[in-house]
Image (cartoon, rainbow, N blue to C red):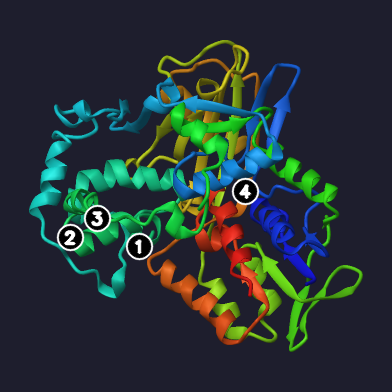
Amino acid sequence: MKTAVLGGGLSGLSAGYYLLRRFGNPLTIYEASPRVGGWIRTEARRDRDFIFETGPRTIRPVGIPGANTLEMMEELQLPLKPIPRSHVAARNRMLYAKGQLCMLPNSPRGLFGVKPPFTQPLYKALLHDLSTGRTLASNEDESIYSFAERRFGKEIADYAISPMICGICAGDAKQISVRFLMEGLFEKEQKYGGVLKGVLYSRFEDNVDEKKQGLFAQDQPKLYAQALQEKWAMYSIEGGLEVLPRAMRKYLGQHDVNVQLSNACQTLTFSKSGVRMSLRNADVPVDHVVSSLPAYKLAPLLKPQHPSLCEQLLEIPYVDVVVVNIQYNGNQLKQDGFGLLVPPVEKLPILGIIFDSCCFDMNGNTVLTVMMGGHWFDQWFGHQPSQKQILDIAKKYVRQILDIQEEPKFSRVHILPKCIPQYTVGHKERVKRIRKYLKDYKLPLSLCGAAFDGVGINDVILSARRQVDAIP
């Protein structure tokens, strides 16, 4: 079978990896830009021995998705940098709220006593869940904010859940689907009448395990077993996360997979004999296409033959994100940790600050990443903000929040347009309808990636694997 992959980001490269494993060659990956990796970008400052990450910087080794990624890391023989749960970056996470830095609880003891920004002990939020009856959600979905407020109270929704959603997808918790991002908790409430009740009752039932899911039926990947034994909280790769897509491209090339850069697909034409792809210099017939493109980029390729599918894809919204990487000489941080998030209720132009040099050794440099924009990009930055304007805002809030008065020695400003899909209420059903359309019309097209199955590194890799496995 002759297959093609659209997109050379992490999900597209993963699709190539799994297609090669399942079907072998011929296989070609088409990427519109001159590089692979998508939003993963590492800038190594070898002269000063630190790195900037524009996109993600760590991976969590949790559950089937985490095990699946570690299986790939094992095969590619990549040198990993684990952060154990005992590390300060794993233990300490903060909020900036009500004008101060607030440490989030990291043990059961933190549930007792009043700690800002909360005005009552957190155990009372758990009691609220226990004493609140089940509410059957209309259309079997609701916003994460609504769910959290209903189960745990407004304060938890404002100061715990909303900033967490900013950290996951730069989104507004009042619009993001609980059914998609927190399906386990939502289903426990719907089934048992409460989140805590559901957590307790489900421990006595047979949970779906990895064997029933069909992955790792024989053995866990060795690296995953090691991560469990050594209690990794998260990990990165020596040299930065962009090492992963580069290594995948090298691996695919060594196995005769053709990765074509600067070659965007213009149209897809379906017929009984397969798919015809219109590319820069040629029309190419293939038997099956796996698209890892963002939904808004795939939609126009399908519009001539499948306008209703195009419309459904365009229902998935995206947001622009601003990333500012900053380096200072010496240790400037007065509080160590992974970083901080800013609740939207604070009405500040930043989403959060990551303390990169607390997570990994940066040779005595203080390295921070300031995240801004997302759902609130237009509100704070308007149309075409200048790099200086953005950098000045980032420096202002680093001074205000972290009390770093020095000027940074080095900085980078990145505006990432339409980089994160928003999983708005009804997203799970939306994706189900899109994939049902492909099945009903027998289109030789599979869809993987962040638009459909989650924004994290583990999510997009597992998305590619499952879609390749589902090809008939």
Of badges 2 and 3, nearer the viewer stands 3
Answer with left or right where residue 259 lies relative to residue 365. Answer: right
Q: Residue at x 67, y 58 (%)?
A: 15
Q: Position of residue 345 (x, y in %)?
A: 31, 45
Type of the residue with mark 1: Arg
Camera-side residue: 10 or 465? 465
Say if mark 2 contacts mark 3, CB within 8 Å: no
Disc 4 designates what residue? Answer: 416
Type of the residue with mark 4: Leu
Vertical arrangement, residue 297 with respect to residue 413, above or below:
below
Disc 1 designates what residue? Answer: 179
Among the two numbered marks 4 and 3 on one chain, the one whose residue lies closer to the N terminus: 3
Residue 384 in sight: no
Answer with left or right where residue 128 lies relative to residue 313. Answer: left
For residue 192, the mark is 2
Type of the residue with mark 2: Tyr
Say if mark 1 contacts mark 3, CB within 8 Å: no
Q: CA distance from mark 4 to mark 2?
A: 41 Å
Secondary structure under the numbered disc 1 in the rendered image:
helix
Vertical arrangement, residue 325 with respect to residue 14, above or below:
above
Q: CA distance from mark 1 to mark 3?
A: 21 Å
Residue located farthest toward the right when viewing the structure as drawn: 281
Among the two numbered marks 1 and 4 on one chain, the one whose residue lies closer to the N terminus: 1
Of badges 4 and 2, nearer the viewer stands 2
Q: Point out the image quarter for the C terminus.
A: bottom right
Q: CA distance from mark 1 to mark 4?
A: 27 Å
Disc 3 designates what residue? Answer: 205
